Image: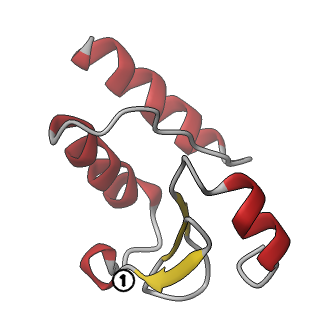
Amino acid sequence: MCTHSYFHQLYTNTHKLTVTGERNVPTQIHKGIVIDRVDLKTTHEEVDMIIQQMIDAVHEGHTGVAVLSDDTDVFVLLVYYYVVLK
């Protein structure tokens, strides 16, 4: 996904896509430009720290945060924060 230029042009013109994975530094794609988000670097393997970074982004005024995960912990934490912050 991070190397597919057609995808970059088609889907990231109006949205920012940030991809996390095995690397400590997430990759962000926006308007076809791929950058490393060193400011989001984390050595935490557990999702609670990464979710906190997303909550901080929402507090800074970002909207439209989307999460794709098959981990139950992620779902439970997102429901918790949705209820608490609403």
Quadrant position of residue 31: bottom right
Where 79 falls versus 16 (above or below)? above
Disc 1 target residue: 43
SS type, badge 1: loop
Quadrant where the image shows the N terminus: bottom right
| Lateral position of residue 30 relative to residue 37, left or right | right
**Residue type marked 1:** Thr
Q: Residue at x 71, y 68 (%)?
A: 8
Between residue 2 and residue 40, name the one nearer to us: 2
Please, is residue 53 above or below residue 21 in the view? above
Q: Residues within 10 Å of mark 1 (few under 14, many from 20)?
A: few
| Residue 82 located left or right of residue 84 | right
Type of colouring = secondary structure
User: Where is the C terminus found, in terms of image quarters?
Assistant: top left
Camera-side residue of 78 and 37: 37
Q: Where's residue 58, x and y in %?
A: 26, 37
* Residue lying farthest to the left in this orientation: 60
- The location of residue 18, given as percent across then percent down, is 52, 64
Instruction: Answer above or below: position of 22 versus 70.
Output: below
| Towards the viewer: 63 or 75 | 63
At horizontal 62% and vertical 57% (from top left) the residue drawn is 12
Residue 68: x and y in percent read 67, 46
**In the rendered picture of this protein, how many numbered marks are placed on residues?**
1
Residue that appears at 38% across and 49% down = 51
Residue 26 percent across, percent down from the top left: 48, 77
Give the side of residue 19 with respect to residue 52, left or right. Answer: right
Q: Is residue 25 above or below residue 17?
A: below
**Rendered residue at 80%/65% (across/down):** 7
